[in-house]
């Protein structure tokens, strides 16, 4: 989907030749929203896979730099590893927290739907009694 590639509703509409209101109307369609989310996740996973490969190369480079004859280069390589590692761990933690929040939101939405159905059934039973 174009939106996943551009990341912008305005750019997506311009490239696909639709008006913004049409796009927003489509967002009311659960299948459309689900497709966008799936495409975004696929794009994210693909990007993540590429980054993992690049990360492996970067780690190898840092390993080589840690063996340098120059103390300054070794120190900078060590500092870079330490700094990057902290940010990577933070990003992983944030991703997990986001997944958990999304799961809880879906569960809450399901419970709300069940509660509404129960209330409707109770109302129907009461009406049948009368």
Image (cartoon, rainbow, N blue to C red):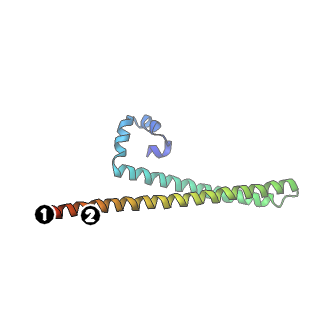
Instruction: State the image quarter where residue 79 is shown.
Output: bottom right
- The x and y percentages for residue 103 are 45, 61
**Residue shown at 44% from the left, 34% from the top:** 14
Left or right: residue 70 versus residue 126 is: right
- The x and y percentages for residue 8 are 48, 40
- The x and y percentages for residue 52 are 62, 58
Nearest the eye: 41 or 92: 92
Q: How many marks?
A: 2
Q: Are marks 1 and 2 in contact (CB under 8 Å)?
A: no
Left or right: residue 70 versus residue 119 is: right
Left or right: residue 11 versus residue 54 is: left
**Residue shown at 35% from the left, 44% from the top:** 26
Specify the label residue 118 is tagged with: 2
* Residue that label 1 marks: 128
Specify the label residue 106 is tagged with: none
Structural crowding at the residue carrying mark 2, measured as other residues with C-alpha within 10 Å and reported as few (<14), some (14–19) or many (≥20): few
**Residue shown at 39% from the left, 53% from the top:** 34
Give the mark nearer the N terminus: 1 vs 2.
2
Q: CA distance from mark 1 to mark 2?
A: 15 Å
Structural crowding at the residue carrying mark 1, measured as other residues with C-alpha within 10 Å and reported as few (<14), some (14–19) or many (≥20): few
**Which quarter of the figure is the C terminus placed in?**
bottom left
Q: Is residue 57 visible?
A: no
Q: Is residue 55 visible?
A: yes
């Amino acid at each position: 989907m174009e939106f996943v590639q551009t990341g912008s509703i305005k750019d997506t509409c311009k490239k696909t030749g639709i008006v913004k209101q049409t796009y927003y109307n489509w967002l009311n369609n659960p299948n459309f929203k689900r497709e966008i989310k799936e495409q975004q996740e696929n794009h994210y996973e693909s990007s993540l896979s590429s980054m993992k490969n690049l990360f492996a190369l970067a780690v190898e480079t840092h390993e080589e730099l840690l063996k340098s004859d120059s103390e300054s280069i070794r120190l900078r390589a060590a500092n870079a590893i330490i700094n990057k590692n902290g940010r990577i761990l933070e990003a992983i933690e944030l991703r997990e927290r986001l997944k958990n929040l999304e799961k809880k939101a879906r569960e809450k939405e399901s419970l709300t739907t069940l509660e509404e159905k129960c209330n409707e059934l109770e109302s129907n039973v009461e009406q049948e009694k009368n």
